[in-house]
Image (tube, rainbow, N blue to C red):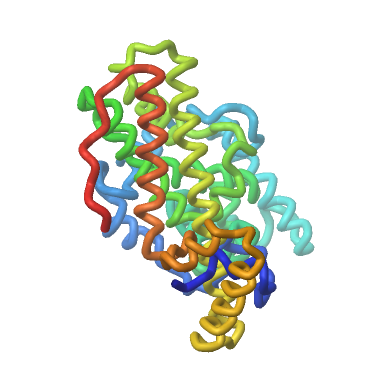
Amino acid sequence: MNGEGTRQAGRPSARQPSRGRPGGEPASLPSRGPAAAAGGRERSGQPGAPPDALRAEAPDIADLWTPFSPGPGQPASRQGRSGQRRYEQLQRAAGREPGRGRPRPQPALSKLEIVDAAIAVADADGADAVTMRRVAQILSAGVMSLYWHVANKEHLLDLMIDTVTGEIDVPEPTGNWRADLRAHALSQRAMLRRHPWVMEFIGGRPPLGPATAVYLERALALLDSLGTDVATTMNVLTTVATYVLGSALREAREALTSRNDEETGFSEEEIATWMAERRERLVASGRFPHFVRLIDDGVDPDAAETRDERFEFGLDSLLDGIAARLGGPPPPPARPPR
């Protein structure tokens, strides 16, 4: 037994988590440019692949941004004028009159490239690390060139959230809502593990873009076979999403604690000695028989190797409750322990 869960209360963590990624670990910056997108997210239906129409912001859905955000809520023409104003402001700040001197640069980047680069930064170092300057450096472009496509960082953040929302797979309804919803929840969790920074914004920003609209439409259709009203359907989806989010947050904290424990410098022998002494004190008190049994049975509630099993146990229990309340297919046969 690693004892991570039982020894947390008795020993302080080695360090505080960083402000960036929830896991706190340094990471190399992954590639999310066009080449990476073509390799891992090009085709719809694959895990982590938003629909092709969303990647291209097809004209029939590109204007689905709601007006809550001053950036993505603007029509394309207004966004262009916003970029022009930003260009003129930067020209004046540099002591040049707009329209004079060197020709005004034409946009050479795509919005997709900018958003992919920003997501790569957030995946590596957290959303706080995303700045227009850093994204421009990654793309080997000038900062001003970004403003042809995004109004400001808030606009870029909305685009990032909408893009990763499009990575969540919503299977085609099979008629078995329970199996479909389970597969959907597993995909939600996978997205949050790839992009842990998104958890900072769930529930704090309104649904905005076309990928989010398509995602929600498909998710609502997933439960058509239940025959419930739309409010109940939304409650079911929210209940499952809340479980997924809570589990993903806990897993991120477990991983951080595990890394902190590794950095304390304690050897396995020292930890085992400390745990044995703690167990003896618990036994001597006579007040903690269940806690002692947890230790004796070698159950580590935070073990990395049981995260999938623990998540699926909770998910299946939740689906059991939803099925009992609303009616639905019986649960699948119990699987043997791993």
Residue 13 spot, x, y in % from top left = 66, 73
Q: Residue at image x 78%, y 60%?
A: 93
Pick whichever, 308 or 109, lies toward us.
308
Q: Quadrant location of the C terminus?
A: bottom left
Could you say which quadrant of the image residue 60 lies in?
top left
Q: Is residue 290 visible?
A: yes
Question: Is 104 placed left or right of 88 in the picture?
Answer: left
Residue 191 spot, x, y in % from top left = 41, 50
Question: Is 217 placed left or right of 130 in the picture?
Answer: left
Number of marks in picture: 0
Question: Is 272 placed left or right of 88 in the picture?
Answer: left
From this view, report whether residue 284 is shown above or below residue 37.
below
Could you say which quadrant of the image residue 78 lies in?
top right
From this view, report whether residue 276 is shown above or below residue 113.
below
Q: Residue at image x 39%, y 12%?
A: 228
Residue 61 spot, x, y in % from top left = 41, 28
Residue 193 spot, x, y in % from top left = 44, 55
Q: Is residue 136 visible?
A: no
Q: Residue at image x 61%, y 49%?
A: 200
Pick whichever, 215 or 10, lies toward us.
10
Pick whichever, 121 or 71, lies toward us.
121
